[in-house]
Amino acid sequence: MKGGCFITLEGVEGCGKSTQLQHLKRFLEDRGVPVVLTREPGGTAISEAIRNLLLDPANTAMASETELLLYAAARAQHVSERIVPALLAGNFVLCDRFSDSTTAYQGYGRGLPLPTLASLHKIATQGCDPNLTLLLDLPAAQGLERARHRGRSDRIESEALAFHERVREGFLQIAAHSPKRITIIDAGQPEAAVAAAVCACVAPLLDGWTT
Ligand code: T5A
């Protein structure tokens, strides 16, 4: 059986991850590659229930530490129930957000200590790290405008612009520390241009898949 591959997309609110994941899924499936598309927080029944708690705008009393642990708990379930089995079965797993979002949002955004987050990542991911991460980079204000166009904001989206700017800066710092794993893509380009850049990054991983 051909080995699986784990690809994550990251970035600020509204940067276009969901849109690009659909393009990437089609690109891979057209080449005969089996794809599992999933998201965080979410991807399993338990993780989706945690997602509802995390994003409910009514949960204004949630402490940052609670938020961190809930994201980690959702991930632990997602990794063990969905991601690892899909990779072992030889799929390309495409995930909308993963651990880098915790570092960017709860670390750089909320100000929780990065070493604590790193320890939690190890527990939640069981060492299952992405082969490739694409950071769709966009100014926070532009992403929020795109996201808010769609209607009611969730609990995290409703945070102040300064929070989202720290998150963007956090993602750029994370990318600077992991240049081999993370590629930055300018998400301010038209949708088709972003899709072409995303597929160009993934194409080299297909060696051995297509004949
Ligand atoms: N979070 C998550 C944490 O705090 N810690 C964590 O550990 C994790 C995993 C998840 C929230 O949880 C936080 C981050 C988030 O706040 P979510 O609903 O999944 O919540 O939120 P997002 O992941 O931000 O998803 P969004 O749907 O808001 O953004 P996307 O998927 O990046 O953007 P997309 O594709 O839906 O596009 C947004 C709009 O822009 C348009 C699209 O048509 C759409 O209308 N668009 C473009 N417009 C112009 N040019 C382009 N190139 C465009 N591409 C898309």
Image (cartoon, rainbow, N blue to C red):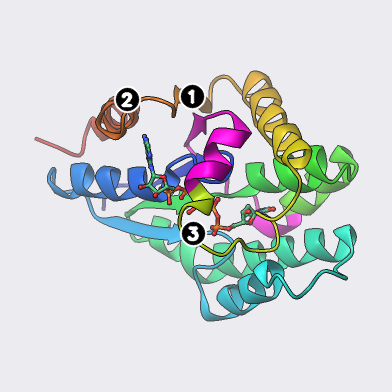
Q: Are marks 3 and 2 in contact (CB under 8 Å)?
A: no
- Between marks 2 and 1, how big is the CA–CA gap? 10 Å
- Split into 4 quadrants, where in the image is the C terminus? top left
Q: Are marks 3 and 1 in contact (CB under 8 Å)?
A: no
The disc labelled 3 sits on which kind of residue?
Answer: Arg
Q: Nearer the viewer, residue 52 or 14?
A: 14
Label 2: state its secondary structure.
helix
Label 3: state its secondary structure.
strand
- Check residue 197 in the rendering and tell me which mark sits there, or answer none: 2
Q: Nearer the viewer, residue 25 or 17?
A: 17
- Mark 3, residue position: 39
- Between marks 3 and 1, how big is the CA–CA gap? 19 Å
Q: Earlier in the sequence, mark 3 or mark 1?
A: 3
The disc labelled 1 sits on which kind of residue?
Answer: Thr
Q: Are marks 2 and 1 in contact (CB under 8 Å)?
A: no
Give the quadrant of residue 189. top left
Label 1: state its secondary structure.
strand
State left or right for residue 113 relative to residue 48.
Answer: right
State left or right for residue 88 relative to residue 112.
Answer: left
State left or right for residue 110 relative to residue 105.
Answer: right
Chain part drawn in magenta: 123-146
Residue drawn at x 48%, y 67% as measured from the top left = 82
State left or right for residue 211 relative to residue 7.
Answer: left
- Between marks 3 and 2, how big is the CA–CA gap? 21 Å
* Residue 92 picture location, percent across and down: 34, 50
Does 133 lie within the magenta span? yes
Label 3 within 8 A of ligand 1 by Cβ: yes
* Direction left: furthest residue: 211
Residue drawn at x 65%, y 41% as measured from the top left = 100
- Mark 1, residue position: 183
